Image (tube, rainbow, N blue to C red):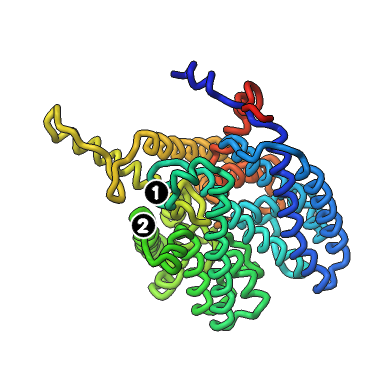
Amino acid sequence: MAKQAAELRYAVRFRVVCKYFGQLCLVLAALTLVPLAMSVIFGDTSISLRYGMVTGGLAALGAGLARLRAPAGVQANEGMVLVALMFLFTPLVMSYPMMASGLGFLDALFEAVSGVTTTGLSTKATLAGVPPTFLFARAWMQWYGGLGIVVFSLALVMQQGLVAKGLAVTDTESDDLVGGTRAHARQVLKVYGVLTALGIIGSLAVGVGFFEAVLYTFAAVSTGSFAPHDGSLATLDWPAQVWITLLCLAGAIPLTFWYRMFKEKRRVAVDFLQIQAVVIAALVVALAVGVAMRLNAGMAWPQVLHHAPLLAVSAQSTAGFASMPCGQLDPGSKLILIFSMLVGGGTGSTAGGFKLLRLLIAASVLRLILLRSCLPKHAVIEPRLAGRRLQGEEIHAALLLILLFVAVIALSWLPFVAMGYSSLDSLFEVVSATATAGLSVGLTSATLPALLKGILCIDMLAGRLEIIAWLVVLYPGTWFGRRMEGT
C-alpha cells in the first residue's frame, strides 16, 4: 500500500505555488494599507515610511508572481505550503515597521508572530508611551490572522468526513480546493464582519472609548489577547469585561454556525455539539478554577466569582485576556488553565488548541473500547459522534493531532526547565504559545533568552497551523518527485 501511495504521489508545482503566493502578497499589501493609513492619521511619520515601503514591495512582488501562467487547480500539499509560507512570511515582513516603535528585530518578530497567529504573548514590559499605530497594527494583525486561519482550516477539510459534514462541504467543493475555499471564505467574512461590527457597537455601549473598542474587538473576535493597556481586562469596568469575554466565546464557536443559523435558518449536529462542548467546558473550568482559588489561595468569594469565569472563558476560547495577573494564581488553577488552553475551542473557529471536537472523538473511541469489554465476542458496535459513524481516517487524524500537540509541548518545555525556569510556569507558557492562547505567568519578557523566544515563536506557528502543515513543508516528497501534468 505504501508503495502504491508513493507511485501516486505528486510533488508541489513551483509555478502554482509562486502564482498563488503572489496573489496572497497582493492581499497582504492591501491589508497593510490599513495600518499605513492609521499611521498617517496619528502622525507617526517614521512608521508611515516603513509601512509604505512594505506595501510597495509586497505589491511589486505580488504583481510579478501573479502574472505567472499556471494550472488553475491546487493540490492539497500546495495549499498547505502556501498557507505555511504566508504565516512565516507575514511576520518577517511586518517586523520592519514594528521596529520603528523601539523594538529590536527579535522582539519585533516575536510581536508580529504573536499577532498573526492570534496568540497575544508580548515581550514588552509596558505599553505606556508606545505609538498608537503600534497598538492598532498588532490588533489588526490578529484580526486578519484569525480570519485567515479559519479560511485555511476550511480549506483543509475539503474532503468527506465528520468535520467536513459539520461545515457543510459538498462533493463539488471537496474536489475544488480553491473554489470551495473561496465559497466558505465569503460566508466566514460576512460572519466575521458582523461580529466585529457588533463587538465595536457593544463595547461603545458599555463605556469603552472608540479606539479601545476597536482594538479590544479585533483581539476578541480573533481570540487574540492584544489589549491596549498593560492590565488587559483589569483596566475595564465589569460590564465591559463581560462583553469582551462574550465576544471571545463567540469567536471560539464555529463561524459557519452563525452563518447557517441567521442566513440559512438551519443548524448542523456537529456545530451544535461543539457549541455545547465549548459552553460546558468553560463552565466546568470556571467551577474548578473557582474551587482552587478558594481552597488553595484563600481568595475571597467576590474575587473568585469575578475572576474564575473570566479566566475560564479566556483559556477555553484561547482568547488570552486576563482580569488578574496569571502569575498570582495558585498551582492548581494554573494546571486547570493549562489543560483548558491545550484543548481549546471549536473546529472552524478562531480558537487555538487541538480543539474540543477531537477530544470528543478520542473520548468516543475510549468509551467504545470500554464498552467492548462488556459485550459478546461477536457483537458489532461502531464509534459514533453527532449522530453519525466515525470513519477510521477521522479517528486516526484526531488522535494523531492530539499526540503531535503533546509532543511539541514536551519538546518545547524541556529547554525552559533545563535553563532553570519553574517547571509549572514553563509548561503554562509553552502551552499558552502552542495553543495560541496568550495567557502568561510572566516568563515572556524582553529578558527571556533568545533561544526560548525562538522556541515560543515556533510553538505559536506550529499550533496555529496545527502542526500538520509544517510537517508537509518539511516532507521531502512535497518538493521532490513526479509533478502533475500541465506544469
Q: Nearer the viewer, residue 417 or 342?
A: 342
Residue beneath the point at 38% across and 60% down = 275
Image quadrant where residue 262 sits: bottom left
Between discs 1 and 2, the one toward the N terminus: 1
Image quarter (top left, top right, bottom left or bottom right) of the C terminus: top right
Q: Nearer the viewer, residue 173 or 450?
A: 173
* Residue found at the very far left of the displayed protein: 376
| Residue 392 placement (x, y as % from top left) | 35, 34
Image quarter (top left, top right, bottom left or bottom right) of the N terminus: top left
Q: Is residue 85 left or right of residue 187?
A: right
Q: Is residue 228 above or below residue 106?
A: below
| Residue 106 placement (x, y as % from top left) | 75, 47
| Residue 52 placement (x, y as % from top left) | 85, 59
Q: Is residue 322 left or right of residue 69?
A: left
* Residue found at the very far top of the displayed protein: 3
Residue beneath the point at 62% across and 33% down = 473
Reading the image, the residue beneath label 2 is 268
| Residue 304 placement (x, y as % from top left) | 41, 69
Q: Are marks 1 and 2 in contact (CB under 8 Å)?
A: yes
> What kind of element bears circle 2?
loop
Q: Is residue 28 above or below residue 482?
A: below
Q: Nearer the viewer, residue 251 or 7?
A: 7
Q: Amino acid at mark 2?
A: Val
Instruction: Work out whether residue 16 can be spotted.
Output: yes
> What kind of element bears circle 1?
helix
Q: Is residue 371 left or right of residue 185?
A: left
Residue beneath the point at 57% across and 61% down = 189
Reading the image, the residue beneath label 1 is 165
